[in-house]
Image (spheres, grey):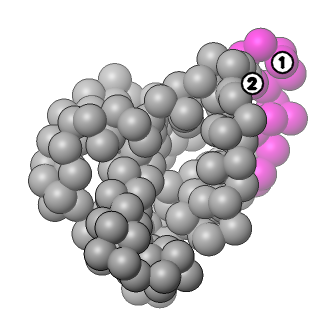
Amino acid sequence: IVKKGHTVYSPYMLTRQFMSLPVLSALARVGPTDVARAITPLLRKAAGSQTATDIAKELRYKSLGLYTGDIIGGMFHQDMANSFLLGRLDGVIQNQWIRNINTKWQDLYRTPDLAVRIASFEKEEARQLAMGTTAKDAEKAGLDFANKWAINYGAVPPGVRFARQMPF
């Protein structure tokens, strides 16, 4: 619970997440309009008003491994569930309304990283297609670009992966 409080629930950490957005965007070579385009489907999903196009994009990104359950290679929610209260956090939080707030807060926490990751992929894929590259090669180049320039917490050394499970 202490680790989750220091990372996910901390208003300071959330502020840092959003303040880092310009830096992450610069590293990934995406502008505000690229990030806005990438974040819009995520916001519609959070509001419960996803379109068919949003769902198709999400499914495509999940199949590519770009967008798993979360930005950290599918590990964030798993880490939170496994590390705290022996994986029984939902069992301890009996109130469904509080569970929903908890999930939405975790999603908000990861949104800046995810938006930059998706924006960098989309921009590079579009650039490759404009140059006449095949769709398959453009997709691969977009993934390579996103993995190189956008944060990918799933691609960390085993020692760092182990340290993420520590309670501090």
Q: Residues within 10 Å of mark 2 (few under 14, many from 20)?
A: some
- Callout 2, which amino acid? Arg
Q: Residue at x 69, y 19 (%)?
A: 49
Callout 1: SS: helix
Q: What is the x, y in percent for residue 8?
A: 46, 37
In the image, residue 37 lies in the stretch drawn in magenta: no
Q: Residue at x 77, y 13 (%)?
A: 97
Q: What is the x, y in percent for residue 14?
A: 34, 31
Per the rendered image, the range of residues in magenta is: 86-99
How far apart are labels 2 and 1 at the CA level?
A: 5 Å
Quarter occupied by residue 68: bottom right
Q: What is the x, y in percent for residue 85?
A: 72, 46
- Callout 1, which amino acid? Gln
Callout 2: SS: helix
In the image, residue 89 lies in the stretch drawn in magenta: yes
Q: Nearer the viewer, residue 155 or 56?
A: 56
Q: Residue at x 59, y 24 (%)?
A: 44
Q: Which residue is mark 1?
A: 96
Q: What is the x, y in percent for residue 1?
A: 57, 40
Determine whether, in the image, residue 22 is placed left or right of residue 87.
Answer: left
Q: Residues within 10 Å of mark 1 (few under 14, many from 20)?
A: few
* Residue 35, visible in the rendered structure: yes
Residue at the limit of the structure toward the front, as seen here: 132
Quarter occupied by residue 96: top right
| Tag 2–tag 1 contact (CB < 8 Å) | yes
Numbered tag placed on residue 99 in the rendering: 2
Q: What secondary structure prevails in the magenta region?
A: helix
Relative to residue 113, is residue 120 depicted above or below? below
Determine whether, in the image, residue 18 is placed left or right of residue 136.
Answer: left
Q: Nearer the viewer, residue 127 or 13?
A: 127
Quadrant, the C terminus: bottom left
Determine whether, in the image, residue 41 is placed left or right of residue 125.
Answer: right
